[in-house]
């Protein structure tokens, strides 16, 4: 199975904190501040689900969340999180197989999801999610980032090592980072807010759909 985080799920968060400190958490916290009460939210690739606790701390009730996660182990851990009085539907599936009957979401969250995908998958998933987001809805996007205007060998080196590691352990399909900005720009999304962490290697953006 591609993109299989099952083996690593119990230690994934510790590993992330070891390498990046709280940068991956903090960039997502920066973005979550844009979520308003009573939102319908789709989270894809939320991992162990700590983001559900963060959302509950911001909005303890009234959120309707769909949590799509391909790893059954990640999902098992996520289900144990305190979620306040919010409603969470947990789905153990590949986002590519997910079809919401007639739901359109106010918020879509893809935290460190697209770095797993080949360009062809990233493109397919982008347009699939775009169709699920309502007009003026927001898309909270967080991922690694290489600034094309700056030469940064340590970032390229770290990215290379990460792809080698996750390629071996999780069999992730990607070997390089896909630049998702052209997809958002090409579909008319507006950048409302942007946050950088870890010396600019981690970037979070709040996009708004036209
Ligand atoms: C790099 S981890 C990030 C986890 C979490 N967002 C975080 O920041 O701690 C990527 C997550 O995306 C999930 N994932 C990868 N491909 C997926 C897919 N096609 N559909 C749904 N989830 C996927 C993995 O199982 C994993 O939990």
Image (cartoon, helix red, strand yellow):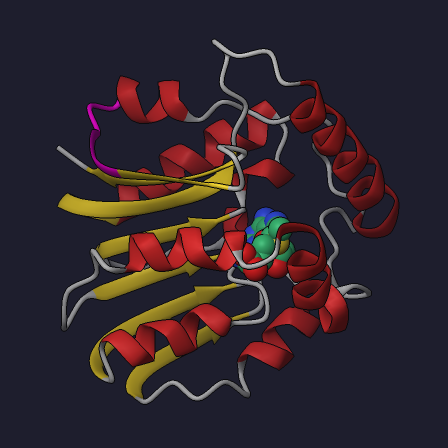
Residue 94 visible in rendering:
no
In this orientation, which residue lies closer to the viewer: 22 or 172?
A: 22
Q: Position of residue 164 (x, y in %)?
A: 83, 36
Hey, which quadrant is residue 191 in on the image?
Answer: top left
* Rendered residue at 83%/43% (across/down): 165
- Quarter of the image for the C terminus: give it: top left
Give the tally of numbered discs.
0
Q: Which residues are magenta?
A: 187-193
Query: Is residue 58 rendered to the left or right of residue 94?
Result: left
Hey, which quadrant is residue 94 in on the image?
Answer: bottom right
Single out the residue that lies furthest toward the front.
199
* Rendered residue at 82%/65% (across/down): 7
Up/down of 184 relative to 151, above or below? below
Up/down of 32 relative to 140, above or below? below
Up/down of 50 relative to 110, above or below? below
Q: Is residue 153 magenta?
A: no
Query: Is residue 174 rendered to the left or right of residue 190?
Result: right
Residue 95 visible in rendering:
yes
């Amino acid at each position: 199975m591609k993109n299989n985080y099952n083996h690593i799920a119990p230690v994934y968060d510790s590993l992330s904190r070891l390498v990046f400190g709280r940068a991956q958490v903090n960039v997502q916290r920066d973005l979550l501040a844009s979520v308003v009460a009573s939102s319908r939210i789709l989270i894809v690739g939320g991992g162990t689900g700590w983001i559900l606790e963060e959302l509950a701390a911001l909005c303890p009730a009234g959120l309707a969340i769909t949590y799509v996660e391909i790893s059954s182990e990640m999902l098992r851990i996520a289900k144990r999180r305190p979620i306040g009085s919010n409603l969470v539907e947990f789905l153990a599936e590949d986002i590519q197989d997910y079809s919401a009957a007639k739901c359109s979401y106010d918020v879509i969250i893809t935290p460190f999801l697209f770095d797993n995908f080949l360009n062809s998958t990233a493109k397919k998933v982008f347009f699939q999610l775009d169709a699920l987001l309502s007009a003026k809805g927001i898309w909270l996007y967080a991922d690694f980032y290489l600034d094309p205007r700056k030469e940064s060998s340590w970032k390229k080196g770290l990215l290379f090592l990460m792809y080698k590691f996750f390629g071996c352990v999780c069999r992730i399909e990607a070997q390089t980072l896909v630049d998702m900005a052209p997809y958002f720009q090409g579909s008319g999304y507006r950048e409302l807010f942007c946050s950088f962490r870890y010396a600019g290697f981690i970037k979070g953006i709040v996009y708004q759909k036209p």
